[in-house]
Amino acid sequence: MKNSRLMFTVALFAGLLLAPALRSQEGQAQKQRTPSQAVLESWNDVGNRLVTMAEDWSADKYTYRPNKDVRTFQEVLLHVAGSNYDLLNHATGTKVGDARNDPAVSDYKTKEQTVAFLKKSVTDGAAEIQKEGDAGVTKHLYYWIGYTEHMGEHYGLLVAYYRNNGIVPPESRPKK
């Protein structure tokens, strides 16, 4: 079991490293990345996709949920941001941000407050990656990979929220 989890983590990390690189470097020679550069690129890629969704989704639909057993759109965003701060608390050994697993909607009453909280969690994560550098990122690699994957899982979930409402997600819209 432990070996299969390790293999999965290694495969996931390889995917996290390669996906943004392949997208941004199509047709160009691949540039060598350090571990912290690769993690930063992946973190920002998925984090910024979520921020774009948070900004794009109409405020009147922040309470939308596909069924009673899942989080609302807003609750998903708050969960991601809280989890990002949980990672930062593990990595820094300090208390930063609102690291509750599911911050209360009553604490983030508006779309603007929710967007700002999510955006700050992504920005603070990126700043920590840059501060830690390769040594720190490698030391906490399991966390960085896992939490970046966590954001990606919730990104996919929110794509389904878009599709359920007949809305094309921002990443699927034609590029100008």
Image (spheres, grey):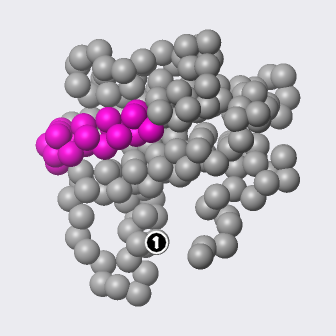
Q: Given the current orientation, which residue lies at the most extreme bottom position? A: 27
* Residue 32 as seen in the image, left or right of residue 54: left
Q: Main secondary structure of the magenta part?
A: helix
Please state which of residues 131 and 93 is positioned toward the viewer in this rendering.
131
**Element type where label 1 sits in the image:** helix
Residue 161 image offset from top left, x and y in percent:
76, 43
| Location of residue 90 by image quarter | top left
Please state which of residues 11 and 65 is positioned toward the viewer in this rendering.
65
Tell me which segment is drawn in magenta: 119-137
Residue 16 image offset from top left, x and y in percent:
42, 55
The total number of labels drawn is 1
> Which residue position is annotated with label 1?
23
Is 156 part of what is drawn in magenta? no
Relative to 32, residue 85 above or below: above
Please state which of residues 130 and 114 is positioned toward the viewer in this rendering.
114
The residue sitting at 25% across, 56% down in the picture is: 37
* Residue 133 as seen in the image, left or right of residue 18: left
The type of residue carrying mark 1 is Arg
Q: Is residue 78 visible in the rendered structure shown here?
A: yes
Q: Is residue 8 visible in the rendered structure shown here?
A: no
The residue sitting at 24% across, 64% down in the picture is: 33
The residue sitting at 71% across, 41% down in the picture is: 58
Q: Quadrant of the C terminus?
A: bottom right
Please state which of residues 163 and 20 is positioned toward the viewer in this rendering.
163
